[in-house]
Amino acid sequence: MIRVIIHTVCYLFLLGMPGILSAQGEATQAPNFDEHIKPIFKQHCLKCHGDDKQEADLNLQGYGSLLRGGSSGKVVEAGRSSQSVLFQAITEPDDDLRMPPNSPPIDLTKIDLIRKWIDGGLLETSASKSMVKSRDLTFNPGENVSGKPVGEPAMPVDLPLVHKPKLTRPFPVLAMDVSPFAPLAAIADQNQVRLVQTETEQELGRLDFPEGEPHVIRFSHNGAVLMVAGGRPVESGRVVLFDVVSGTRLAEVGDEIDAVLAADLSPDQRFVALGGSGRVVKVYSTVDGELQYKLTKHTEWITAITFSPDGQKLATADRAGGIHLWDANSGGILLNLGEHKEAVRALDWRGDSRLLASAGEDGRLIWWDTVDGFPAINKVNAHPPQRPPGTYGIIPNGVLAARFDSEGRLVTSGRDQTVRVWDVDGNEIKKFKLETGIPLSNAITNQRTTVIIGDSAGNLQFNKL
């Protein structure tokens, strides 16, 4: 089937094509069909896909016929080169399927030109307007941000004494979160959660989590409740809600036969959604612990779950790269967000519930417009790894964590041992390089001045923005 689809695309033999677009022109002029793309088709494609002959009913001689596609459907998708058959054909890693056949891969510069033309909105001429819908993604920190407590925000007071476990090596910081209104961070530890004052960096106390390893930690929107989810692999899993001030257990949700790998607490604190190796997302009531509904569309382990800040939507992701958007009240499917090729490691909503960030092992970092499921910002290699001398093969470049702050900035951690901070437009504004260990979790404090990083060696770092 793949071969049939790919062969609807012309014989794009671009090597040696002179003067397509100079380096200076590429920087100053967006590529368009008439000036930059049609000459490629005219030289190498129209014999089989022109006005005289249309193999697979595909005619690339005119702009209109190109947009119509062939017998297998459209070959270009405005704004999404990764989802365009034409682009997939010339970047296919399989030598037998890649176009042009029986030839070396197309020069990366020319591939990038085609990518920019598609992602730029399939311009017909230099005077044309992009076919990608205009979007207003301006962030208003006050929009749909609720839950600010009356009086002083919740801080631990006289927590029960918890003995630190004796470990042969430090426990990796699998999860963390910061209070939205107080200088307080909750950090995963073996069978426990550490509570740290973020201004002094001093530990205030610990919460017992005898259920096992904490894989997910989240403060409620008012900062008064702490959700901890995890368990023991191939044995048990559960979600526990704690009172932040006293450390008292408020509720226990779920009774899984494996560790809970993903979970979230709804903004109104009425529901907990959880998932793991069972490939099913379960939504429970926090009032009586009763199961409300199940989501069974995923085909792989559930790796990330998050409620939108307005409480209307639920986003879930899996180990195969699938992301689904659901109605949080009914469990009805809203959108399928298809872009990641490998496991999605993190999901997080911007505070206005408009944008959803996803991070994956494929190296992609995406800001999704959840109105229509379009990837508004798509970083295909957000954490590019450096190749150590003398090494060969593919170097992992996965993005392992992604969290928004209240200003709409996004902080991410990658296998390149780097933590990066991105502004609301997706521009990198800061980065922190770890000397040892891999950053597994991160967050920006409520004061919005410090990035906290937890790594695979159990270290906790505080870095000023």
Image (cartoon, rainbow, N blue to C red):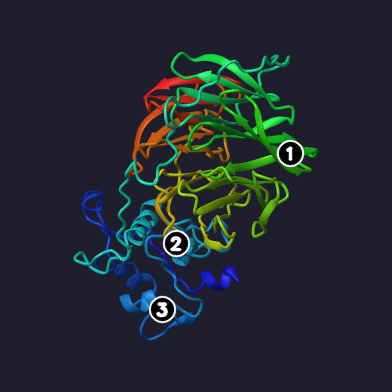
Q: Residue at x 45, y 64 (%)?
A: 84
Give the quadrant of the C terminus: top left
Q: Would you name the residue on which mark 2 appears?
A: 87
Tell me the residue at 58%/40% (across/down).
393
**Residue drawn at the location 46% of the way across and 71% of the way down:** 9
- Which amino acid is tagged 2? Phe
Q: How far, Cα to Cα, is label 3 from label 2?
A: 17 Å
Secondary structure at badge 1 equals: strand
Which residue carries the number 3 mark?
49
Amino acid type shown at disc 1: Gly
Residue 325 visible within the image: no
Give me the disc on residue 237. Answer: 1
Residue found at the far bottom of this picture: 52
Q: Is residue 344 left or right of residue 87?
A: right
Location of residue 248 by image quarter: top right
Q: Is residue 348 left or right of residue 114?
A: right
Q: Could you say whether the residue bearing mark 3 is in a helix, strand or loop?
A: helix
Q: Are marks 1 and 3 in contact (CB under 8 Å)?
A: no
Q: Is 78 or 37 nearer to us in this picture?
A: 78
**Mark nearer the N terminus (1 vs 2):** 2
